[in-house]
Image (cartoon, rainbow, N blue to C red):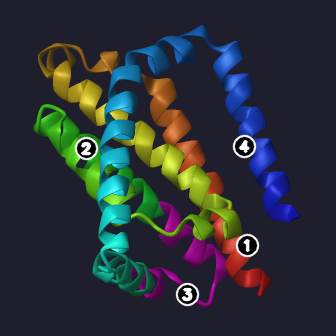
Amino acid sequence: MNERLTLSLVTSAFLVLLFCQPQTLNSLQELSYGTVCVGLAASMGLTVKFSASKLGLKKPSEQAAMLDEFIGGLLVRRSRFRTFTRICLWNILVSFVIAAAGFLTMGALPIVWAFLGLGLFSPDINIFKRYLHSWLETVAVVLSASLGIWGGQNLNLVLMNLSMIPPTIIILILGLHVFAAVMETSKMYAR
């Protein structure tokens, strides 16, 4: 119940940010090409994953689950605040690496990452049903990948004028990660 309330508050805040700030809508329109590319790459990865599972290959899903368990063990601490801080910083670091790699590779690496991370090695759909914070994390990472693709395509303009990087998108990505970390930490300590 608490997790659903937090998710609805985040959704409401996103809608308020979207409709009250015309700059946000323009920023999202600039990132639309990158978002479509990320969606197509993730769809292709999911197609390969489902085709492989029909052929009896389950190795990629098992390896992804093992990696998630390993990283989770590194992030969880006795203190709620430390766990929250570690989860939040980890998620922000992943988004930063994806966006920065997009800037450096002219937008190619976020597409490869979407194929692998959101497609081939994606978590089971039941994860999204059980843990609502996964939706927020995924949206934040898709926005980061889209920002990386946009930045890679406009690198020459961005290098001349760093203020071209849409600050509202960065604030939105950070906010989504903070709310996801709050939801994930509260879910962990509710048990």
The one of 56 and 120 positioned closer to us in this rendering: 56
How many residues crowd mark 4 within 10 Å: few (<14), some (14–19), many (20+)?
some
Residue for badge 2: 110
Q: What residue do we see at 41% from left, 81% from top? A: 65
Mark 1 or mark 3, earlier in chain: 3
Residue for badge 3: 77
Q: Element type at marker 4?
A: helix
Mark 4 or mark 2, earlier in chain: 4
Residue for badge 4: 10
**Quadrant assignment, res 121:** bottom left
Mark 2 or mark 1, earlier in chain: 2
Mark 2 or mark 3, earlier in chain: 3
Q: What residue do we see at 37% from left, 55% from top? A: 46
The quarter of the image holding the C terminus is bottom right
Mark 2 vs mark 3: give the one in front: 2
Mark 2 vs mark 1: give the one in front: 2
Question: Between marks 1 and 4, how big is the CA–CA gap?
Answer: 15 Å
Considering the whole magenta stretch, tell me its main secondary structure. helix
Q: Element type at marker 1?
A: helix
Amino acid type, callout 2: Pro
Amino acid type, callout 1: Ser
